[in-house]
Amino acid sequence: EAIYYDARYNFLLMVKAPWYYRIFEYAPELIPIATIGFFADFFDRAIIIRQIQGVLGRGKYLKSLRWERMLVAVVVDFAKRNGASRVEIVPAKRNEYYSAENVERMYMRYDVTARRSGFSFFPETGNYAHIL
């Protein structure tokens, strides 16, 4: 149920907690269900996405959404509004959590999401990129 923040900046996708969750005084009104984490390269005016993570156990909220693409679109919009020249997504194989146990899931989450979001692979950087 935890989110690990692997980047300097994150956007959270949250859902209003169900009534039975909020019966406790300490329970939050909104609960996180996914995050996208990124770094800003101010010298190169680039935004580099390093993390696209759903919260374990919150799949029922995410299954009907194309949440990965939605979060990427939020970062692209943020980058445009803040004068970035491009947005990059680090491919699965370059992710620190990539392992033999999660090859397919990581590939779908990073590489396929990047391509479906209109990003192209740039061998020079080793990342997928979208020029703004």
Image (tube, rainbow, N blue to C red):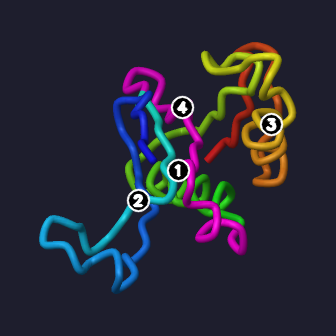
Q: Position of residue 19 (x, y in %)?
A: 34, 86
Sequence order check, earlier mark of 3 and 4: 4
Q: Residue at x 68, y 71 (%)?
A: 65
> What is the secondary structure assignment of the residue under circle 4?
strand
Residue 59 falls within the magenta-colored stretch: yes
Check whether the beta carbons of the residues at disc 2 and disc 1 lie within 8 A of each other.
yes
Q: Residue at x 43, y 41 (%)?
A: 3
Tag shown at residue 55: 1
The residue at the far bottom in this view is 19
Left or right of residue 112: residue 82:
left
Q: Residue at x 78, y 28 (%)?
A: 102
* Distance between the alpha carbons at the discs numbered 2 and 4: 22 Å
Tag shown at residue 48: 4
* Distance between the alpha carbons at the discs numbered 3 and 1: 19 Å
Sequence order check, earlier mark of 2 and 1: 2
* Distance between the alpha carbons at the discs numbered 3 and 4: 14 Å
The amino acid type, in three-letter code, at marker 2 is Pro
The amino acid type, in three-letter code, at marker 3 is Asp
Sequence order check, earlier mark of 2 and 3: 2
Q: Which residue is mark 3?
A: 111
Q: What range of the chain is rendered magenta?
A: 41-65
Nearest to the eye among marks 3 and 4: give it. 3
> What is the secondary structure assignment of the residue under circle 1?
loop
Sequence order check, earlier mark of 2 and 4: 2
Left or right of residue 21: residue 118:
right
Question: Foreground: 127 or 66?
Answer: 66
* Distance between the alpha carbons at the discs numbered 2 and 1: 7 Å
